[in-house]
Image (spheres, rainbow, N blue to C red):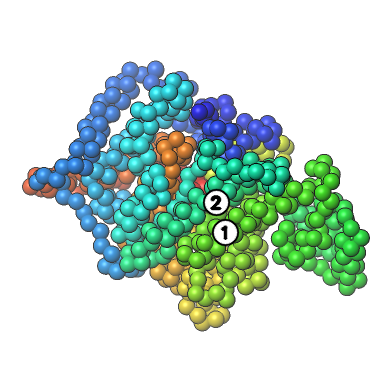
Amino acid sequence: MQRHFISRTSSLLNTTTSLNKSFQRVNHHNAPFNALTFLAKSRFHSGGQANPFYTSKSVLIKTVSSVAAVSMAASYYHYSGTNDKDGKPVESTSAPISAFSSSTSTGTIAQLLDDNNRSAMQAKSTQELLLGLFVYKLCTYPWIVDAAPHIIKLAETLHLQTPVYWFVKNTFFSQFCGGETAEECVATMTRLSQSGINCILDLSVEADLHMDDVKNVSDKESLGKYWRQEQKADVILEMIKDCLKTAAKGQHEEYATSGAFAAVKVTAFAPPELLLRVNQVMLYLDQAFEMYQTDGRVDSACLNHVVNQICPTPSTNLQQLQRIQILSHLQENKGTLDYAEFSKLFNLRGVGREIWWETEDSKTEKEVFLTCDDLQAYDRMVNRLEQVCQLAHDVRVGVMVDAEQSYFQEAIDHVAMNLQEKYNRRDDTDHSPTVYNTYQMYTKAAQKKLERDVERANRNNFAFAAKLVRGAYMVSERKRAEQMRYPSPIHDTLEDTHDSYNNGVRFLLKKLHHYQDTTGHALTATTAPIVFMVASHNRESTILTVEEMEKHHVLPRSGVVHFGQLFGMQDQISYTLGKNGYSIYKYLPYGMIDEVIPYLLRRAQENSAVLGGVSKERILMWQEVKDRFSEAAGEVHTPLESTSSIDYSLSVDGNTNGNTTDGISTETA
C-alpha cells in the first residue's frame, strides 16, 4: 500500500505546473483525484527556518514533560472507561431540546462572546475532556504535526502500521471522527442530539477503494473508456446509500431542531477526467455570456458564437435545421436572453440537449469538447446522484454537495442546481429541501453566482438551498492561477473574504425577510424559498448571522437557517447555539483508519495553525476537569478568571480569537 502525503513544508504542496500535477493527492491503490491541500499560514513557527526540535533543548524537555502529563490524563481516560467505583468525577447530563428555552439573540450573543462559557465542556464526559486535552496538546507542537505524515508513511513501508493505527484510532480518530462505520456513528449522533446538535454524516473516502470490493463487469465496453473508474463509483454509490439510511436512523426529533444530512462529493460519482471536460464547457459558456452581455442580457450574436465555437457541428440534417430555426427566431424578434434563460437553453440535461450537444460516435476529444462517450458517462453520473437524492428524499435526509477545486466546481454547480430543480420543488410542501449546494465565498465570483442561482430557483419554483463556506483551496488556487497565467479567482485579502461571506449571509436573509413581508407567510423549512447553512468556525460571522436573523424576524427554530462546524472543533460555538434553540450541525466523518488519515492530518494541521483558539478551548477543558475532580473529592473550587487576561503567546501571528480556523476546510466546506 502506497500513500503520498503533502506536509506544510513539502515541495509538493501547491506546486501545480500542469493539469496532471494539479491532482497531487492522498492515495493508495491508484486513488482517484482527491486533492489534499492545506491553507497555508504566513508562518508556523515563532523562530526562523530551523526546526525548533533541534535548535532548542528546552523545547524537547517541555515536550517530554507535557506529553508525560497528558499521558497520565490519557491513562485515566482508558482506565475510567471500565471503572465505575465511587469517587469518579461528577459527569454532566444533557436534557432534551424541549428543556432548552430559546433565549433572545442578545443572550445568545453574550454567551458566544463569553470566553468563560463552559456549556460545551459541561456536556462532555470526563473521558472526552481528557482525550481532547491530549489531542490538542499534541497539536501545539508543529514539529509533531509536520512529522506525522512521514512517520505514517515509514510505518506503512516497514509494515509496522498496526501500532501507529492503534494510536491514531485512540487519539485523533476518536476526537474528530464518529467511527469506522456509519452504524458506529449513531451513538455519537444520539449524544450530540441531546445537546440540540444534529449531524452531517460523511463517508470519508479520501483514499481509493480496494478493487476486491468492485464487482466484475463482463461487458466493460458498456461503460466505455471510463469503465474502471465507473465501477468504483458504483461501489461508492452503495456506500452512500448506507450512509443515508444510517443518517435517517440517527435523527432524534425529541432533541434536535432539524433533520440529519449526508455529505457527498460529485467527484466520487464520476471519472475526474469527465468532470474536467464538463467543467471546461461550463466555463466557456460563462465566458461567452460575459463577453456578449449588455445589461445582463445577450442576443443572437452570443448564441451564434456558442453554436460555432463551443457546440459540436451538427451530426444530422434535423439537428442543423433545429438550430437554424431557434437562432432565426431569436434574431428576427430581436430577442435577448438573461443568464437564467441562456443557461437553461444550453443545459446538458435540458430539453435542447439533442439540438446542441449530441454528436457522432466517431468524433474524438480533439474534435469536440464532449464526445458521445462523455455524454453517456455524464448521464450515468447523474443517474447515480439521482438515486442518492431520491433515497434521501424518501428517508427525509438532506444531501450536502461539497465544494471542490475550481477545475471541477463549475461542473459540480451545474449538476447540483439541476438536482435542486428536481428534488427541491416548492409545490412539495410536505418536504424541506433535499439538495444543498456549497458556495465558496472566498472566490470573487461567489456573490454573483449566489444571486444568479437564487433568481433561477425563484423563476423555476424550487427552493434554493445552500451551504456557505469561506473555502479550502486558497493557496493552491492562487498558485495554479499564477502558473497558468490567469487572474486569481480568490479574493486578494482576508478582509475581502470576510466581507464576501458576511454579505452573502445578509443577502439571503434579506430575501427571506422580503418573502415574509410580501406574502405574510411565516418561514418554515417546507415553505421558505431559501434555506441555507452558515458553515463557519468564525465567531464574528456566527454572531452577525444571529443579529441579522433577529433583525429580519427569522426564528431560530424555523429551520431555514442552520449553522455548521466540524466535529471536535469549535464546540463552544456549537453547544451554545444548540442550547439556545438554533439549528446547529456537526460535520461527522467516518471510515476505516487508513482511509480517514488524510482527513485527520488536516485537522491536526488546522489546530496546530490556530493555537489561539485551541488554547482557549484547552483552558476551559482543563478547568472543567479540575472542578470535577475537586467536586468528587469534596473540595471547593474557584471560578475561572476571565481568559481575556491570558497571554496567548502560542498564537499564530498574534491571532487570539481563533477566527483563522475558518476557510481551511470544506467539510463544513
Report the side of 449 relative to 612 (left or right): right
Q: Residue at x 71, y 42 (%)?
A: 225
- Which amino acid lies under the numbered mark 1 shown in the image of this protein? Gln
- Residue extending farthest left: 634
CB-based contact (under 8 Å), mark 1 and mark 2: yes
Image coords of residue 40 (percent x, y):
52, 36
Q: Nearer the viewer, residue 232 or 401?
A: 232
Q: Residue at x 50, y 71 (%)?
A: 431
Tell me, yes or no, if residue 524 can be seen here.
yes
Q: Nearer the viewer, residue 150 or 505?
A: 150
Relative to 408, residue 576 above or below: below
Nearer-N-terminus badge (1/2) = 2
Q: Residue at x 33, y 17 (%)?
A: 57
Distance between the Cα atoms at labels 1 and 2?
Answer: 8 Å
- Which amino acid lies under the numbered mark 2 shown in the image of this protein? Leu
Image coords of residue 629 (percent x, y):
15, 44
Report the side of 74 relative to 367 (left or right): left
Image coords of residue 445 (percent x, y):
65, 53
Which mark, residue 237?
2
Relative to 561, residue 241 above or below: above
Q: Element type at marker 1?
A: helix
Q: Residue at x 30, y 52 (%)?
A: 120
